[in-house]
Amino acid sequence: MTNANDRKQIQDYYKMLLFLNESTSDFFFLWDIREKKFHFARELNIARESTGDDVCTYTMDDLQAVAYPDDCKMILRQLGNVADGNEETMDFDFRYLDSYGKKNWINARGKVLKNHKHQPFVVMGCLSRRVLAEKVDMLTGLLNYNKMLDNLNSKIARGHRGHLIVLGIDGFRDVNQRMGREYGNHVLIRSAEILEGLKGEKNTVYRLDGDHFAVDLVGYNKKDAEDFYALVKEKTAALCSFSAGIVSYPFEKEKDVNILISYAENALGRAKEAGRNRMEYFSSENYNKTLSRIELQQEMKESIRNNFEGFELYYQPQVTSNEYKLHGAEALLRYHSRKFGFMSPVVFIPILEKSGMIVPVGKWVMQQAFAQCARWRKLQEDFSISINASYVQLREASIVNDVVEAAREAGLPGRNITVEVTESMQLQDYNYFNNIFSNWRNKEIHVSIDDFGTGYSSLSYLKGLEVDEVKIDRCFIRQIQKSAYNYRLLSNMLELTHSARIRVCCEGVEDEEELHCLDTLFPELIQGFLFGRPMPAQEFEYTCLVPNDAYMQLIRRLTEYNEKERLHKECTGQTAISEQFEYRKILDQLEEIVYLVDTESQEIYFMNSAAKKLTGVYNYFGSKYSQIFAGDVREISGNSMEKEENGSYLTEKMLYEKYGRLLRVRERAMTYNGRPAVMVVAWPVEGESRQQDRRVRDELYGLNQTLELYELAFRKKHQPELIQEILDFTGHYYQSSRVCLFLYDSRMDIWQDVYSYLEKGVMDKKRFLKLTAGDSMRPWAKLLEEKHAVFIRSAEELKEKDQILWNGFMLQDIYNCMLCSICDQNHKVVGLVSVDNADYCRDDLFLLKKAGRLLENVLFCQNEKTDMTERLHRYVEKTLDHNILSATLIGLWSIKINKDSGQVVMLADDNMHLLIEADKDASPAQCYRNWFENIHPDYIHYIHNVMDTIITTGQTVEASYPWRHSERGWVNVRCVGVKTSETDRIITIEGYHRLIDDLQQMKAVPDSGYTTQ
């Protein structure tokens, strides 16, 4: 109850309210703490109780009715602190809903007034929108950047901790352009509402500028922050995607809020560069790189103003194929930084492009390169020059005239100029680019597509763009002499380009074997380290235009080799089949079936039209001979060899039935492009009787072979040798291309091909690692639980019955298969023997069953004291192919976690073994220890969180952390992992491990030999 003195004092405050009301537009109020009523000098346009005077009185419920629901708890908490005597002042911001339902920010400030007994009984204060007028975003109603600065400064000063996350809408500019600004505003408003709905009570959402938002996650740890971002991705997925950058505060000793915000924005930029729709943590190392990039950008800007000081052109020779005459050079831009030294194009070219400085620099390159070419034409009249044009330059309206005018000033004919554009730019706007290219071609200037084959739709470029040349990237050239597949692929690319009357330049040629292999494909131009690295103009002139002895010796040696090869082919009669592409046209006209097979790999080089028509296979690249042509093989009696007059042999070897027809086959051994090959010609045989049934003779033969098989056990003493001989014997008996012994390791849930018999050129099953995982092999084990041995005559039998098994057959080039189980003492299937593509088959699989039984005895002999599980684990681990996949500077791994025992092992490829400093023969358990025990102790918890995230979400996760190297100390590592399978007992995570430090060093090496522009 308010006494008389207090009431009189309140009346005096009423008068003060009325006085203040006349001098300001703010809403002054008097809060009677005991009566729980608010008295305003101005009406608030909400329902209130009548007091009969000029003062408007409202209850707490009246005010709560118009306050934004999410802010009500905060308002009550702030007022409660004052009412309880904990605070003598109040100053907070909250939102209220106007008559249109729109949210508005308002500031509440007040001071506690005490009565004559020094007790707080009223608060005098005001509600003001002016205080926040410049700190509220008008579109979304969120607080803006300025308010965020105030709030963060206050929190850091009071010792608060948390995470600041800055979010940006991916591709928002495209949204505005495609859908209009009205829709873009809708996306922003809706995004703000979603973020408001996800934040906690103590957190605040801000709109910074454009499509950038920030959320202050007060008191959140790293895991909480990651969970918050995951929720944002989930809730906004239908509307847009968000990238995010995040930084903890205070970060180290940094308390400047502006710098903390720049840290988070830097991390956001990295998230967008890394592919968008992801979150990146702030990294001091990456931030320093950004600062260095900014510094380098500023330095290059000054260099341009100072007449392109620091920029220089290097030149790499281009020579003609086979003759190796100098055709010209490619001009490559280099930059020498005053602070950072010689810069790799990988570093400075993207900066030039993003900043737009590539336009003036590109004009300078044209002027310098064309003038240099004009001088060199005095030494070699037909000398040509190639320059690179970036996507940014091509979008300039003046680009056509820039090239033409630079050529005119240098006095250089257009026919000696080639402008290279990069295929990875995705030149889909054919009309726009063809208009540019057409104008150049009218001036005889040539157009080339660089890095051909590495983009998204190479073939469509040749159809849609008017170009004169394509440059085949190094990735297709590397070790081409060792890859029949790459050779065929490149052969077809060249055939395609030549048919379109487009010349080809193969770049990245580094050794003579690659060169000699390329010479058989007849590209027009060759470029690479073999003939010269990029070099300054003076060195190029001395080395290539006025050749020194070393260069001349190289050209002489290469030319002599080519001449010897040509003469050899003429003597051996190989030239007819090796002529560029004419042989294809000739053979396509024949009625006979003709195809060419690589002897070693058994891959098909060529099929003529008759062969394609018979088989129905038109895309045969990468296919094995056995996949398309093998069938029911039957030997022909009589003389099988005929000697031709020229000394070569024809072998009439077999009849086989395929595609419903019986064919007589003749083969001719030959050399094709330097590799041993067989040319096969087949004629259909009509009405010829089949051979007699040889069942009785087969059975006698089988018994004899079984005795010989068992005899092996008496002759051999060493277990591995005996197992291998049993498999070899089985393969020879069934005339099979491949026999494999698989054993199952329950610890790692993996089936491993521990021993194999392979015909020459047949692919090892270990190449199909995916098929040895527990889930993939389980159907085979189930099949053999029902039957001890199974004969699958044709893969097509499985297509309707079991899609998984059928897919396995297709992947492994199997057209028939015999399987026999390997069982333990409890008759449980713990392994199997597979006999693939057998030419000699019997339904009872007599010998295979005997071989399986013998293998069981050898593997699980009673003298072995270790238990069955340990023995199987030892076999698998000993022969496990650690080289899962090989990639430069990247180690690939597969981690398996046993849910029952908690044991964790790592299957590592050869690169991973090197990176984690594990012995080549280190076990999977040792590999895991080598990796995990050298992680920086401060990051162990972080790595556990990463693993948990991978397992629980099933998403691909990237992690960066320090790792201890025995010689180099702490190195920076980046890992990417994803859960690939999970059974009742085993979780499998696969991914890669990369030393980021090494990657930086590689990029910093100048003159890489690749065209960066």
Image: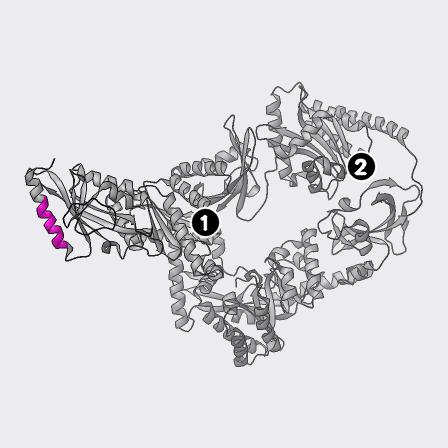
Q: Is residue 923 left or right of residue 848?
A: left
User: For mark 1, does the 10 Å Cα neighbourhood hold few (<14), some (14 to 19), or many (20 or more) residues?
Assistant: few
Q: Main secondary structure of the magenta part?
A: helix
Q: Position of residue 417 (x, y in %)?
A: 59, 74
Was residue 12 drawn as part of the magenta stretch in this picture? yes
Q: Can the viewer see residue 546 in this picture?
A: no
For residue 997, the mark is 1
Q: Is residue 326 left or right of residue 186?
A: right
Q: Earlier in the sequence, mark 2 or mark 1?
A: 2
Asked if 661 appears above or below 411 in the picture, the reply is above
Q: Residue at x 50, y 69 (%)?
A: 393
For residue 735, the mark is 2
Asked if 195 appears above or below 318 in the picture, the reply is above
User: Disc 2 residue type?
Assistant: Gln
Quarter holding the N terminus is top left
Tell how many labels: 2
**In the foreground, 751 or 952:** 952
- Gap between marks 2 and 1 measured at Cα: 52 Å
**Which span of residues is magenta-colored?**
10-20
Q: Can the viewer see residue 324 in this picture?
A: yes
Asked if 458 appears above or below 699 in the picture, the reply is below
Q: Position of residue 309 (x, y in %)?
A: 42, 70
**In the foreground, 728 or 834:** 834
**Quarter-of-image position of residue 572:** bottom right
User: For mark 2, does the 10 Å Cα neighbourhood hold few (<14), some (14 to 19), or many (20 or more) residues?
Assistant: some
Give the number of the mark in front: 2 or 1: 2
Q: Position of residue 716 (x, y in %)?
A: 73, 26
Q: Is residue 856 left or right of residue 229?
A: right
Q: Residue at x 93, y 42 (%)?
A: 638
User: Disc 1 residue type?
Assistant: Asp
